[in-house]
């Protein structure tokens, strides 16, 4: 069973606010902005950068930043980062958190430079 409609709206609001506050300023949005996807069926939230493709500027490229998956049985969020090989890997310094707010704070802090390099 996935997120309820209420949960999905709440998560979308949290992430939208995070992207607006922490992401690139609006003056750069034609070159770089942050986006997200909330998948209620898989119970995941993914943050990514959106940039124009370097050879075809009319096409947009999504580059992953971070991912969290809610595990209902454990009542926590599993945290992932993307390795250079293109695979999502559990974020070992802090593999699970209690809330999506904690996840966003951790991504912002990025102590180990896994999310933003």
Image (cartoon, rainbow, N blue to C red):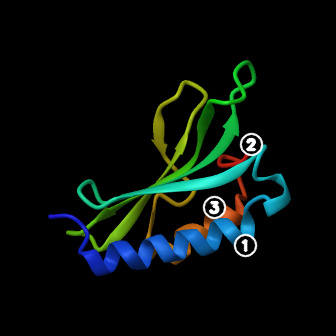
Residue found at x 23% / y 57%: 41
Q: Residues within 10 Å of mark 1 (few under 14, many from 20)?
A: few
Kindly check if marks 3 and 2 are in contact, taking CB atoms under 8 A apart as contact. no
Q: Is residue 114 above or below residue 83?
A: below
Near-viewer residue (76 or 27): 27
Q: Secondary structure at mark 3?
A: helix
The tag on residue 21 is 1
Residue reaching furthest right?
27
Task: Assign the N terminus to one quadrant of the image.
Answer: bottom left
Residue found at x 72% / y 72%: 21
The tag on residue 117 is 2
Q: In the drawing, does residue 71 fall left or right of residue 33?
A: left
Q: Is residue 40 above or below residue 18?
A: above
Q: Is residue 93 above or below residue 51?
A: below
Q: Residues within 10 Å of mark 2 (few under 14, many from 20)?
A: few
Residue 105 in view, yes or no: no
Q: Is residue 30 above or below residue 23?
A: above
Q: How many marks?
A: 3
Find disc 3 in the rendering and name its residue.
Answer: 107
Of labels 3 and 1, earlier in sequence is: 1
Near-viewer residue (9 or 115): 9
Q: CA distance from mark 3 to mark 2?
A: 12 Å
Of labels 2 and 1, earlier in sequence is: 1
**Where is residue 61 drawn, in percent x and y?**
61, 34
């Amino acid at each position: 069973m996935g997120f309820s409609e209420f949960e999905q709206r709440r998560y979308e609001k949290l992430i939208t606010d995070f992207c607006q506050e922490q992401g690139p300023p609006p003056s750069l949005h034609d070159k770089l902005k942050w986006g997200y996807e909330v998948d209620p069926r898989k119970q995941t939230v993914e943050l990514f950068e959106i940039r124009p493709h370097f050879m075809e500027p009319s096409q947009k490229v999504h580059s992953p930043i971070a991912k969290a998956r809610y595990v209902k049985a454990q009542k926590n969020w599993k945290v992932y980062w993307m390795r250079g090989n293109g695979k999502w890997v559990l974020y070992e310094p802090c593999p699970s958190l209690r809330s999506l707010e904690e996840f966003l704070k951790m991504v912002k802090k990025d102590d180990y430079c896994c999310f933003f390099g």
